[in-house]
Image: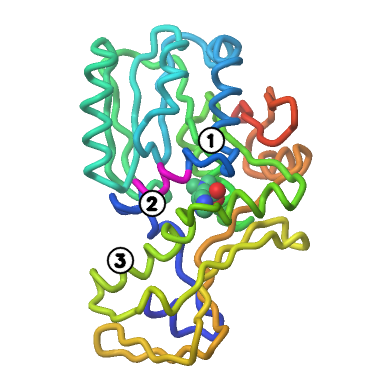
Amino acid sequence: MLQGLQDARKELPSKYFYDDEGSQLFEQICELDEYYLTRTELAIMQTQKQEMSALLGPQCLLIEYGSGSSTKVCTLLDALQEPVGYVPIDIAKEQLLRSVAALARAYPELEVLPVCADYTSDFELPVPKQPVLRRVAYFPGSTIGNFDREPARRFLRQIARACAGGGLLIGVDLKKDFNILHRAYNDSQGVTAQFNKHLLVRINQELDANFQLNQFGHYAFYNPGQSRVEMHLVSLKNQTVRIGEVEIAFKLGDSIWTESSYKYTLEEFAHLAATAGFTVERVWTDSRQLFSVQYLRVT
Ligand code: AVI
């Protein structure tokens, strides 16, 4: 965190949004009218789950990277043919434990094998009791968009290795009218702004800092040259912030870059997938082509 704030271009890794409170704020974002992503993806899952289930086949081990509240996966679990297990991976422990308990009630037959980890790190995949025919990763929500290009490729390669002989069901947000993107990341209720500032709240609480939340503004815009929505926190005045023993000076207008959310065309994503060891087998989209769910097979 300190390193990121001391660089000439101040930047904080977006993965730190997701402690328990941050994860709850994100769940609130997913309910917003302006945030079309979740709603659109869920509708695609609902209408296409039978075909998805046929592609994934019987006795698969479903591994979800960044499972959150594990709500999206239920649509899939309802349709899958005799899944041998479900591995939810998430860094937010409380939420992970809550969702495991809920899943155990809803799917008493299903073996649930939770992993509390940063899913981009090296961790051991648990082995279910029943034999596995195919390992399939599930990475919904277009979280792949929060990775820069090279880290995205590395992460997809990591999944391809973990699921050799299997595949990946992934949600990918698509390029579209900038105004739709602008509204999605600048909602009228200010939930996204609160989510963005949550990083500062965490630094204050966990690293003994004194950021004044009302002295930083939420700023999100689409950068067409880079095909991404950028989220920043912009200093509203000249100020000095203390983090532990370290003082960091901000000038009026200085920004902390907190997140990128890349948007793809289907061709661009197929190219990225191919360079990471996957072949796109099937793409489902909504009628407005806002969002896609894709099944990639490990090549
Ligand atoms: C988790 N991720 C896909 C979200 C996104 O749209 O990039 C995070 C988010 N940031 C602001 N609103 C939602």
Callout 3 amino acid: Arg
* Closer to the camera in the image, 151 or 74: 74
Q: How far apart are marks 3 and 2 (CA)?
A: 22 Å
Secondary structure beneath label 2: loop
Q: Which residue is at a point 56% across and 63% down the rendered structure image? A: 231
Image quarter of residue 60: top left
Region of the chain picked out in magenta, as a range: 24-29
Is label 1 in contact with label 2 (beta carbons under 8 Å)? no
How is the protein colored in the picture? rainbow
Q: Name the residue under label 1.
A: 38
Is label 3 in contact with label 2 (beta carbons under 8 Å)? no
Q: Mark 2 points at which residue?
A: 121
Q: Name the residue under label 3.
A: 202
Ligand 1 under 8 Å from disc 2 Cβ: no
Crowding around mark 1 (Cα neighbors within 10 Å: few <14, some 14 to 19, many 20+) is: many
* Closer to the camera in the image, 115 or 260: 260
**Magenta stretch, overall SS:** helix
In percent of width and height, residue 204 lies at: 28, 73
Image quarter of residue 3: bottom left
Callout 1 amino acid: Thr
In percent of width and height, residue 110 lies at: 29, 15
Task: Mark 1 vs mark 2: give the one in front.
Answer: 1
Q: Distance between the residues labelled 1 and 3?
A: 25 Å
Secondary structure beneath label 3: helix
Callout 2 amino acid: Ser
Ligand 1 under 8 Å from disc 1 Cβ: no
The disc label shown at residue 194, or none: none
Q: Which residue is at a point 41% across and 17% down the rendered structure image? A: 77
